[in-house]
């Protein structure tokens, strides 16, 4: 019994150290310029602020993740980006899962009205408004791009695969936000 008691104390101590470490890192990152893969960051301040006409966003086909800051509360996430028909979109998957509800709070915030933010890509900041796309033919192009870029499905993507991905979006399992110019 004494060995079990010592073992449980040791496990509890290791768990406590891990929790304190993760909490400290999260708090420390909350004021940093930009996010890491694991922890959200603070306000995006580095980089040129874009003020001209919209660029040709097709260059994002070669970029896996970008930094996206929401303004209220001020927090930055590293997130997938894709371009379809000249517009850019971000994706938040697993929205109906327990993990998604914990990990993807930014998407819930954006959907509830915290839709003003800043996108940083290639050290250039772009003021954006997040507009959730729930339905419409635009989802066909978005689904095809999503499958080709992040799932490794060869192009042209089949109509059946596009229909499956689109149904996943329309059912609310994955959320798509257009990053509209503001």
Image: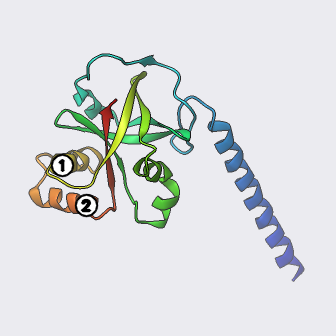
* Total tally of numbered discs in the picture: 2
Q: Name the residue under label 1.
A: 144
80 with respect to 70 (left or right):
left
Quarter residue 89 falls in: top left
Label 2 vs label 1: CA separation? 15 Å
Q: Quadrant of the C terminus?
A: top left
Extreme residue toward the front, this view: 113
Q: Name the residue under label 2.
A: 170
Identify the residue at horizontal 26%, vertical 19% (top origin).
Answer: 53
Q: Can residue 10 be seen in this view?
A: yes
Label 2 secondary element: helix
Identify the residue at horizontal 42%, vertical 18% (top origin).
Answer: 49
Residue 120 horizontal/vertical position (percent): 42, 28
Residue 13 horizontal/vertical position (percent): 80, 61
150 with respect to 102 (left or right):
left
Q: Is residue 153 visible?
A: no
Comparing 62 with 124, the one in front is 124
Label 1 secondary element: helix
Do tag 2 and tag 1 residues touch (Cβ < 8 Å)? no
Residue 123 horizontal/vertical position (percent): 43, 21
**Relative to 134, residue 47 above or below:** above
User: Which tag is nearer the camera, tag 2 or tag 1?
Assistant: 2
Identify the residue at horizontal 55%, vertical 30% (top origin).
Answer: 43
**Relative to 103, residue 88 above or below:** above
Which comes before the other along the chain, label 2 or label 1?
Answer: 1
Quarter residue 87 falls in: top left
Q: Residues within 10 Å of mark 1 (few under 14, many from 20)?
A: many
């Amino acid at each position: 019994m004494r060995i079990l008691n010592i073992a449980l104390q040791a496990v509890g101590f290791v768990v406590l150290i891990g929790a304190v470490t993760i909490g400290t890192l999260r708090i420390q990152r909350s004021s940093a310029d930009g996010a890491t893969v694991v922890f959200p960051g603070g306000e995006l301040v580095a980089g040129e602020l874009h003020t001209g006409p919209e660029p040709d966003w097709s260059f994002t086909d070669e970029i896996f993740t970008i930094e996206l800051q929401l303004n209220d509360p001020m927090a930055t996430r590293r997130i997938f980006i894709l371009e379809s028909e000249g517009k850019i979109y971000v994706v938040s998957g697993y929205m109906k899962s327990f993990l998604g509800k914990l990990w993807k709070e930014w998407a819930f915030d954006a959907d509830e009205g915290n839709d003003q933010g800043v996108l940083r890509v290639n050290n250039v900041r772009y003021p954006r408004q997040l507009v959730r796309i729930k339905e419409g033919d635009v989802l066909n192009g978005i689904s095809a791009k999503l499958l080709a870029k992040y799932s490794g499905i060869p192009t042209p993507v089949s109509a059946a695969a596009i229909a499956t991905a689109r149904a996943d979006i329309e059912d609310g399992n994955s959320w798509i936000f257009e990053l509209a110019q503001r």
